[in-house]
Image: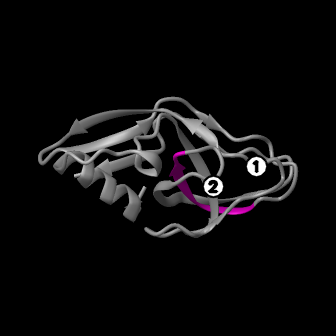
Amino acid sequence: MSAATDYTEANALNYLLTTNALTGNNARPTAWYVGLFTAAPSDTGGGTEVSGGSYAREAVTFSVSATGSPATTTATNTTTITFTTASANWGTITHVGIFTLVSSGTLLFWGSVTTSKVIESGDTFQITAGNLSIELQ
């Protein structure tokens, strides 16, 4: 993924460098969900998330490791993420995002997919284990 949202950046600094309580909308999430986009979001949100046609965000879990010098810390998905089979055309998937809730919620990270993929009725979109990564260096 290529970007952390403004929300994520502010909360990371608050968590690491202050004693401010992270409560309400700023509380640490307890679950994370992958969303698919047909137009790029930005650090302030937006973009065009898929809707309709049986689309729903899918839950994701991550493992974190650090490698190299200087170290790059990477979070990767631990299991394959399989979206529900499309019951209508979803369009061309160009970006993915990590959200705090299965619907609405807050966009935490976003980035482009390696290869855009047209999803038509009857198709399934899948991200295999280890192929969704978020890096910090």
| Most frequent secondary structure within the magenta stretch | strand
The residue at the point 57 percent across, 33 percent down is: 80
The picture places residue 12, in percent across and down from the top left corner, at 29, 51
The residue at the point 47 percent across, 34 percent down is: 30
The residue where tag 2 is placed is 36
Q: Type of residue at label 1?
A: Tyr
Say whether residue 4 is visible. Answer: no
In this rendering, is residue 109 above or below 59? below
Horizontally, is 40 left or right of 86 in the view? Answer: left
Front residue (pair 102, 122): 102
Residue 60 falls in image quadrant: top right
The picture places residue 3, in percent across and down from the top left corner, at 39, 61
Q: How is the image coloured?
A: one colour
Determine whether label 1 and label 2 are within 8 Å by CB. yes
Front residue (pair 113, 98): 98
For the N terminus, which image quadrant?
A: bottom left
Q: Type of residue at label 2?
A: Leu
Question: How many angstroms separate mark 1 from mark 2 (CA)?
Answer: 9 Å
Front residue (pair 8, 127): 8
The residue at the point 41 percent across, 38 percent down is: 76
Say whether residue 13 is visible. Answer: yes
In this rendering, is residue 94 above or below 27? below
The picture places residue 122, in percent across and down from the top left corner, at 85, 46
Q: Which residues are magenta?
A: 91-100
Rendered image: mark on residue 55? 1
